[in-house]
Image (cartoon, rainbow, N blue to C red):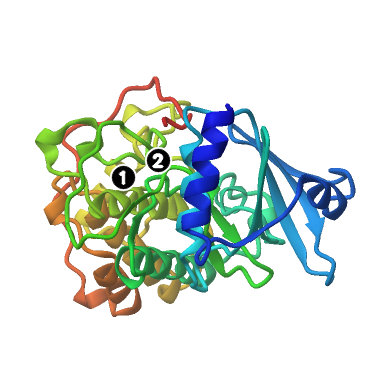
Amino acid sequence: MAEYNVNLEIFLKNQEFLAPKRYSYSQIKKMTNSFEIKLGQGGFGSVYRGELSGGNLVAVKILSELKGNGQDFVNEVVSVGRTCHVNIVSLVGFCLEGRRRALIYEFMPNGSLEKFIYGRGSSSNSHLGWEKLLQIAIGIARGLEYLHRGCNTRILHFDIKPHNILLDQDFCPKISDFGLAKLFPEKRSMISMTDMRGTPGYIAPELFSRSFGGVSHKSDVYSYGMMILEMVGGRKNVQVEVDHTSEIYFPHWIYKKIEQHEEQLELHGIVSEVESEMARKMIIVGLWCIQMNPFSRPTMTKVVEMLEGGLELLEVPPKPYMCSPSRSVESSTIE
């Protein structure tokens, strides 16, 4: 443990000009009022509401016991510490004191995208119309484009999913949770990976088997595609409780409707031709993003272009999957 901290201290010292502000554990306790208001819980630990001395609200993520060599903590501090973009969450500071580790982020009053896209009938989703969903999809795409192309160091996120997209007071989306991220300064297009990382349901096929192609920024594109299809469907892509097997896998079901040019998409809340076009645009882009072959997927730059352009410019892609997944589906994160 001591050796781990020494190595991490040396690493952070070398990164000092990039790393955000460092706080002591007593400062963390003070800013959270002794961990009074809990915002959430995950495999990583717990998140509490905090307030800085200037009055700015923050979200304080207290990391649970070290997993592996603490690489998730390092990834988070270094990768987010290097970013500055309206669609990437800002890391305000961190704490490393003995076994205690914490990450301090800007506060996102609307929480994660997840709660707004599942269970469409609920009142919580009523103010997220199709126009807002499209704007959120474009914002996330811009954030990913920045990670892949705009930073000095290319960053691959590897865990894009609704839970990791946070929304500010204006529902502007911000990509968060860089615990599984990979940084590579060289201008290589492929990276070598010894471990599979991500959340089942969003992991690109090449992370399961290299026979599908090399691991690259296109792996994030795949996760993004799965996510925007969930935004459109208002449900998980794999729905085990539906009666008809044909409806278990949403991308298949919606592909058939788009391919046959069906007028009625049978999606929640579409009341006008304009909204129908927005939904169709998101579906076609999502289906391009989840192509099995990484080379067939668009770059995030192209995704932004497609989402902002006209529907008439978009071609329906080839069917993305040969077969649907089975009914036994997990939803935990693999690290």
**In the depicted view, which residue is nearer to us: 233 or 67?**
67
Residue 324 on image: x %, y %: 26, 31
Identify whether 133 is placed above or below 73: below
Identify whether 286 is placed above or below 191: below
- The disc at residue 64 is none
Within 10 Å of disc 1 (Cα), the crowding (few <14, some 14-19, many 20+) is many
Residue linked to disc 2? 237
Residue 138 on image: x %, y %: 42, 70
CB atoms of marks 1 and 2 within 8 Å: yes
**In the depicted view, which residue is nearer to us: 73 or 303?**
73
Which SS class for mark 2? loop
Quarter residue 248 falls in: top left
Image quadrant occupied by the C terminus: top left
Residue linked to disc 1? 251
Which amino acid is tagged 1?
Pro
Residue 93 visible in image = yes
Image quadrant occupied by the N terminus: top right
Which amino acid is tagged 2?
Asn
